[in-house]
Image (cartoon, helix red, strand yellow):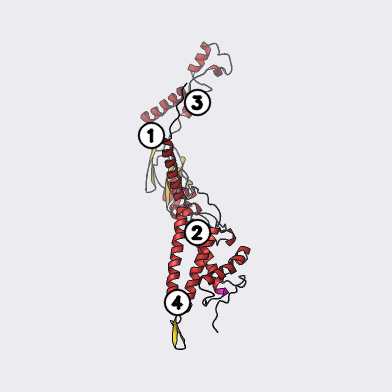
Amino acid sequence: MALKWDGTAGAILDSTPFGFYDAETAYQTDGPKVAIWCAQRLGYPIQDVELISGSFYAVFEESVTEYSSQVNQFNIRENMLALSGAETGSNFTHREISPSLGGMITIAENYGTEAGSGGNVDWKQGSIDVVSGSQKYDLDVLWANVSESSADIEIKRIHHEAPPAIVKYFDPFVGSTFANQGMLDMFGWGNYSPGVQFIMSPMYADILRLQAIEFNDQIRKSGYSFELINNKLKIFPIPTNSIKLWFEYIVKKDRSNPLKTAAGRASDYSNVPYENMKYTNINDVGKQWIRKYTLALSKELLGSIRSKYASIPIPGAEIALNGADLKQEAQTEKDALIEQLRENLLAAARRAQLEKDKEESENLMETLRRVPLKIYIG
């Protein structure tokens, strides 16, 4: 005896393949109703429907999952830049995602590393002993081979500058020149201690003196500089005493390593933490789409069953089955529903909404331009 719909919908609990939504009261209530509706849309009770409650419940669960998948796919694409790097232990389904600059900053960190203004690669410090009379030093031999196990390094900064001018100027607020002391005596403040507190000079005077000291050192003395080629350092002027020279560098393999974040973070489309929606939280618009998609899947399943035999023999004739027609009709309806859902999602996208707001604002301004202005007579 062939199995067919008998007009009675059993309980949906424990009757679905995966049981994703069985625990939800709304799902348990709607499941039998959807099964009865689909059976009636397929011709029952005028004609037999070779499906049972479990068949309808299976496609009903698939329809809810398909709706959830389509919406989640769109949300992942819409927010991928903001979601990258988020913890995979979270659940973003049915939650508002706030746009952020995190993804853009992550991309820009590579430039920050090279510019020395941030980034995600550690700048390390090293030093070598500069010997009096020696200009050339191989930083690979003296530092990389010893401190970085012969790893390739890239020097970012050499701390080899002339002494700052301020150390030659003394303290402008204390005053240590004879000129200052003479000025104090002329004003009768020479007996005060410290009398310089009575002298007020503009800041630009100090800056001009510092600049004069720097120009003097640059023109009349050997300039402090260096030449760095392939980590071979040559310093100027020739050292006259032994000092310790400091520098900053990165290890090249640290910059080339693409794994800058710890495991357990959203990295691509495959592990962004979106889960199946709760059926209870889906609005009526979504539930109507689910019901229609359930009907389309029911037609497809019924068409597959009826396609097993092209016809059924009866006394004196045979009955042709419409399995192929049902499958074709179901595929058309499924494609139309998916296309409709995707169009609605695109229309609700952030970019589309911003463009719509812009258009409304421009239209409003154009309307207000045509409103006559009042004339006030004093």
Query: Does 350 lie within the magenta span?
Result: no
Q: Earlier in the sequence, mark 2 or mark 4?
A: 2
Q: Which residue is mark 3?
A: 170
Q: Are marks 1 and 4 in contact (CB under 8 Å)?
A: no
Q: Position of residue 33 (x, y in %)?
A: 58, 67
Q: Earlier in the sequence, mark 3 or mark 4?
A: 3
* Front one among 110 and 249: 110
Quick one: label 4, few (<14), some, or many (20+) residues within 10 Å? Answer: many
Q: Compared with residue 221, is residue 300 higher up or lower down, i.e. above or below?
A: below
Mark 1 or 2: the one toward you? 2
Residue 71: image tag: 2
Q: Compared with residue 342, is residue 231 higher up or lower down, i.e. above or below?
A: above
Magenta-highlighted residues: 50-54
Q: Compared with residue 78, is residue 376 higher up or lower down, i.e. above or below?
A: above
Please name the amino acid that badge 4 sits on.
Gly
Q: Which residue is mark 1?
A: 223
Q: Secondary structure at mark 3?
A: loop
